[in-house]
Amino acid sequence: MNRITSAVLLILCAFVTCTSFAADPLVVDLWPGKTPGDVGINGQEVSRIHQSPIVGPTKLITNVTKPTLTIYQPANNENTGTAMVICPGGGYWDLYWELEGEEVAAWLNSLGMTGIILKYRVPRRPGDVRGEPPLGPLLDAQRAVSLVRSRAAEWGIDPKRIGMVGFSAGGHLALATATTFEKRTYKPIDAIDEVSCRPDFAILCYSGYLKAKDKDEISPGIRIPADTPPILLTHANDDSESVGGSNAEHSAIMYLALKRAGIPVELHIFATGNHDFGVRQNEKLPSSWTQLCVRWLRSQGFLKPSSNG
């Protein structure tokens, strides 16, 4: 019996990633009333456990009609002042809440950074163009950056060190926010919208929707302003995800476009690692991207030198 129990525990430990935080998170509504630009969907918000062929069971959330921010703050004596708005992936249909949300926030907290998970509207709404990124999530992301910056002092955040990190479709959302800050995609509704929605940096992990279909150029919906913030891209060369066509060419083409536009940019493409590697530490090559990211943040002045990471 003891052997059987031990075997079961080992199996469970292999599938469960333990996350720990300094305190319970603060959850804040993104919009004061009705979600702007949203036609709505049928059904209530739900979560489920998805059996991913790459990472195993992980929690997904969908049917989001009331976007929120979930703020995980590091211990006071470890706070660096740097924060990231986290955009989970899911093809703009679901949100990989655990793998690309809570686990990322825990990683950021361990480094003294505030992790803020953006629960943006999913799934796609009626009228969204098939095969293209929907419009609604960008409204949520722009509002999220402004809201975080407007409450930076309250949350122990440096208003000049607020970045974004996104995974898969969430990576596209981070890039869209970092390049679409000159004009909001919605009509301002309150004082929060008077605060800049430009992130100070953006990190894109195995992103899709960056490359034009059948062309070696960026998607026609993307333009790169001269003051686009620094960008870090990471991908695996054998990425097999078909949603949004997120193979490594998307990151490579985006890197070239940013470089040619004079934007500070860094790219890491690993030989193997597939999709959905998140921030998990294992024997796979992409697990080293988190250390590379910390060094990049320090080199850009967004994270002061520390003994952590």
Image (cartoon, helix red, strand yellow):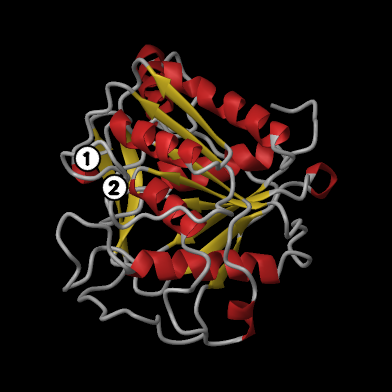
* Callout 2 amino acid: Tyr
Q: Secondary structure at mark 1?
A: helix
Quarter of the picture containing the N terminus is top left
Q: Are marks 2 and 1 in contact (CB under 8 Å)?
A: yes
Q: Is residue 128 above or below residue 32?
A: above
Mark 2 highlights which residue? 209
Relative to 76, 181 lies left or right: left
Q: Position of residue 293 (x, y in %)?
A: 59, 31
Relative to 294, 228 lies left or right: left
- Which comes sooner in the sequence, label 2 or label 1? 2
Name the residue rendered at 59%, 54% in the picture. Answer: 227
Quarter of the picture containing the C terminus is top right
Q: Position of residue 225 (x, y in %)?
A: 50, 56
* Callout 1 amino acid: Gly
Name the residue rendered at 62%, 41% in the picture. Answer: 108
Q: Position of residue 81 (x, y in %)?
A: 76, 50
Name the residue rendered at 31%, 58% in the picture. Answer: 221
Q: Is residue 262 above or below residue 81?
A: above
The quadrant where residue 26 appears: bottom right
User: Label 2 neighbourhood size at 10 Å, few (<14), some (14-19), many (20+)?
Assistant: many
Q: Is residue 250 above or below residue 74?
A: above
Rounded to the nearest whole Å, what is the CA distance between mark 2 and mark 1? 7 Å
User: Label 1 neighbourhood size at 10 Å, few (<14), some (14-19), many (20+)?
Assistant: many
Mark 1 highlights which residue? 245
The quadrant where residue 105 appears: top right
Q: Position of residue 181 (x, y in %)?
A: 52, 65
Tell me the number on the disc at residue 228: none
